[in-house]
Image (cartoon, rainbow, N blue to C red):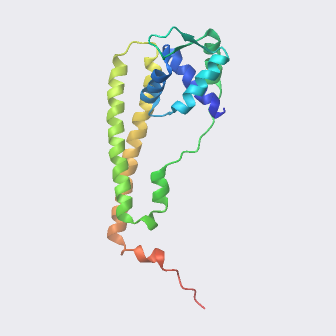
C-alpha cells in the first residue's frame, strides 16, 4: 500500500468516527492514533482535497467562517473498507536510540546509560498514559471502543517491553562498567599490524 493510500485511510477512518474540520481531524489523529500513527498538516490537507475531488468526502456547512467540516460519503465508506482490507506493508522501524547504542563504543558507556535511562522514563510515561486511556475505554460503550482498546493494549505491551529491555540494557551497561577498564582510547588508537 502506498504512503498516499495510508494517509487517505487515516483521514477516511477519522471521518468515519464523526464529521470534522481538517484541524480537528489532525488533532484526532494526533491524540487518538498518536501512539502508533502520525500525519502532518502537510499530508492531511492535500488528502482532504483529493478525497473531496474523488467524491469520497464532502464539505458540510461551516459552523464558523473560514473552516470547513468534512464528512464521509457512502463512496468514501466503501473506499475506506477496501483500504482497510488490504494487507499492511511492513515498515522498517527507525529508532535513533538503537542507532546510537549500536555505535555505543564511540559514544561511551555513560552517554549510553543516559540514553537507556531516558528511554525507560519515556516508556514509563507512555505506559501510564495507555493505562489511563484503557480505563476510559473500558467504561465507554460506544461501538468503536473495543477496537480502539486493541490498539491501546498494543501500546501497553510495547511500553512494558521497552521497560523490560531498558532494565536489561542497564544491567549490561553496569556489567561493562565493572568488568572492563575504560575503553575510550581504544576506539581512537588503531590496532598495530604484526609483521
Image location of residue 115, percent across then percent down? 38, 55
Q: Quadrant of residue 131?
A: top left
Residue nearest the viewer, comparing 176 with 101:
101
Location of the N terminus by quadrant is top right
Residue nearest the viewer, comparing 88 with 66:
66
Image location of residue 85, percent across then percent down? 63, 23
Residue at image coords 34%, 50%: 118
Image location of residue 27, percent across then percent down? 44, 26
Image location of residue 22, percent across then percent down? 50, 22
Residue at image coords 68%, 17%: 54
Q: Residue furthest front?
A: 65
Location of the C terminus by quadrant is bottom right
Q: Is residue 137 left or right of residue 38?
A: left
User: Is residue 109 in sight in this rendering?
Assistant: yes
Residue at image coords 38%, 40%: 160
User: Is residue 172 in sight in this rendering?
Assistant: no
Considering only vertical position in the picture, is 77 above or below 112? above
Q: Is residue 8 left or right of residue 109?
A: right
Residue nearest the viewer, comparing 164 with 94:
94
Q: Is residue 150 left or right of residue 73?
A: left
Residue at image coords 39%, 40%: 159
The tally of labels here is: 0
Amino acid at each position: 500500500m502506498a504512503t498516499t493510500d495510508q494517509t487517505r485511510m487515516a483521514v477516511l477512518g477519522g471521518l468515519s468516527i464523526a464529521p470534522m474540520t481538517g484541524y480537528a481531524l489532525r488533532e484526532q489523529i494526533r491524540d487518538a492514533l498518536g501512539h502508533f500513527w502520525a500525519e502532518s498538516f502537510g499530508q492531511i490537507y492535500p488528502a482532504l482535497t483529493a478525497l473531496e475531488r474523488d467524491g469520497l468526502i464532502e464539505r458540510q456547512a461551516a459552523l464558523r467562517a473560514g473552516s470547513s467540516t468534512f464528512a464521509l460519503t457512502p463512496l468514501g465508506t466503501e473506499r475506506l473498507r477496501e483500504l482497510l482490507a488490504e494487507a499492511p506493508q511492513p515498515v522498517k522501524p527507525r529508532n535513533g536510540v538503537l542507532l546510537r547504542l549500536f555505535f555505543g563504543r564511540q559514544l561511551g558507556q555513560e552517554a549510553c546509560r543516559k540514553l537507556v535511562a531516558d528511554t525507560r522514563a519515556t516508556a514509563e510515561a507512555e505506559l501510564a498514559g495507555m493505562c489511563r486511556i484503557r480505563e476510559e475505554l473500558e467504561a465507554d460503550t460506544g461501538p468503536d471502543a473495543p477496537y480502539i482498546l486493541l490498539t491501546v493494549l498494543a501500546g501497553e505491551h510495547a511500553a512494558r517491553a521497552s521497560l523490560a529491555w531498558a532494565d536489561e540494557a542497564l544491567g549490561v551497561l553496569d556489567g561493562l562498567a565493572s568488568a572492563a577498564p575504560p575503553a575510550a582510547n581504544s576506539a581512537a588508537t588503531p590496532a598495530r599490524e604484526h609483521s
